[in-house]
Image: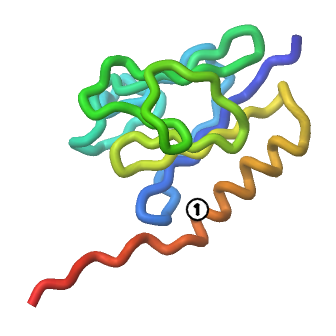
Amino acid sequence: MASTQISLTTILNGRVTHRLESVKDRVLIGRSADCDLRIDSADVSRMHAAIVAKSGRHFLEDLGSSNGTSLNGRPVRNAELRNGDIVQIGDYSLHVGILGATGADDLARAQQREEQTLSTPPPALPTTR
């Protein structure tokens, strides 16, 4: 079986803040310096979530975080990931790309969803007078 690579692009307010590509079997996401993808935000638990590779498939696991994890707008504890999925942790969107196990159509879908997010301006902040 060919090894697969996970690609995570982290976006906050329409701007890319991190990019991570990994072939590890387990990618930890959280506030801790021990995490593979570190997100420095009070809304993110020290060990918030993990992405685990099993038999060429990737799964998102919430690690008992305080504020939860969403996949494509729905709260999840455990779920299989696909190219183009969007994981929400706090105010951050993580765009998922899985390379090596699927075809070019899925990669194109992931890139298109990332471009849509980057081209959508963040909501305007209310003004105070």
Task: Give the image location of residue 5, x and y in percent.
Answer: 73, 28
Tell me the quadrant of the picture where the N terminus can be found: top right
Kindly indicate the quadrant of the structure image that contains residue 104: top right
Q: How is the image coloured?
A: rainbow
| 84 versus 80 height, above or below | below
Name the residue at the bottom extreme.
Answer: 129
Give the x, y percent position of residue 61: 48, 20
Q: Is residue 3 above or below residue 113?
A: above
Q: Given the current orientation, which residue lies at the most extreme left position?
A: 129
Quarter-wise, where is residue 20 in the image?
top right
Residue drawn at the location 33% of the way across and 29% of the way down: 33
Position of 30 with respect to 54 (left or right) is: left
Which residue is more in the foreground, 99 or 62? 62
Q: Position of residue 110 (x, y in %)?
A: 72, 48
User: Residue visible at 70% across and 39% down?
Assistant: 97
Helix, strand or loop for disc 1: helix
Front residue of 26/86: it is 86
Q: Is residue 28 above or below residue 82?
A: above
Q: Which residue occupies the extreme front position in the image?
A: 74
Residue appearing at x 9%, y 90% in the figure? 129
How many numbered dots are placed on residues in this image? 1
Residue in the picture at 30% in, 28% down: 32
x and y percentages locating residue 26 in the rendered image: 55, 16
Q: Is residue 44 left or right of residue 6?
A: left
Residue with the mark numbered 1: 117
**Residue closest to the eye, 10 or 110:** 110
Residue type at the position of mark 1? Thr
Within-10-Å neighbours for mark 1: few <14, some 14–19, many 20+ = some
